[in-house]
């Protein structure tokens, strides 16, 4: 990545807030998926629980990648942060 930020600070702040909100939603989905798996579902329900879990984990991975890009953008811009809305994720 280049040494200069390509995204304006307000765009980075908005994306950071969205990534944080997505992290919260994903955490709920992952917890529900875990509980579904513990309930010993049968047949298609077990398959669906695995599908939900896999999709949520993929979404969490993408969210983590987005947050890393934003972190790199902030670093390239001299460490400036337009917002402090970034919070912990399931991966933190």
Image (cartoon, helix red, strand yellow):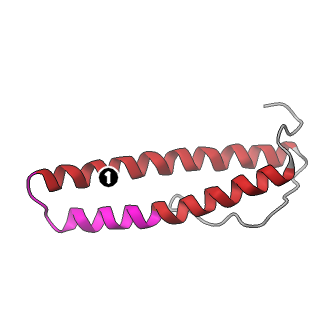
User: Relative to 89, is 67 above or below?
Assistant: above
Asked if one can make out residue 92 in the rendered structure from this viewpoint, the answer is no
Q: Which residue is drawn at 79% across and 44% down?
A: 73
Write down the residue under mark 1: 52
Asked if one can make out residue 45 in the rendered structure from this viewpoint, the answer is yes
Q: Please provide percent x and percent y for residue 86.
A: 69, 63
Q: Please provide percent x and percent y for residue 3.
A: 88, 35
Q: Is residue 48 left or right of residue 53?
A: left
Front in this rendered view, residue 79 or 60: 60
Front in this rendered view, residue 16 or 38: 16
Q: Please provide percent x and percent y for residue 64.
A: 58, 49
Position of the C terminus, as image quadrant, is bottom right
Q: Which stretch is magenta?
A: 27-43
Q: Residue at x 83, y 54 (%)?
A: 10
Q: Please provide percent x and percent y for residue 42.
A: 9, 58
Examine the structure image and report whether residue 37 is included in the region drawn in magenta.
yes
Q: Determine the secondary structure under disc 1.
A: helix
User: Relative to 48, is 35 above or below?
Assistant: below
Q: Residue at x 22, y 51 (%)?
A: 48
Q: Is residue 41 left or right of residue 12?
A: left
Q: In this view, does 5 lie to the left or right of 69?
A: right
């Amino acid at each position: 990545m280049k040494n200069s930020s390509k995204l304006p600070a307000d765009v980075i702040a908005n994306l950071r807030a969205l990534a944080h909100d997505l992290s919260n939603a994903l955490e709920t989905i992952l917890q529900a998926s875990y509980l579904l798996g513990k309930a010993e579902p049968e047949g298609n329900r077990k398959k669906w629980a695995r599908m939900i879990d896999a999709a949520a984990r993929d979404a969490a991975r993408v969210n983590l990648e987005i947050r890393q890009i934003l972190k790199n953008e902030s670093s390239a811009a001299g460490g400036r942060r337009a917002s402090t809305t970034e919070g912990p994720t399931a991966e933190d």
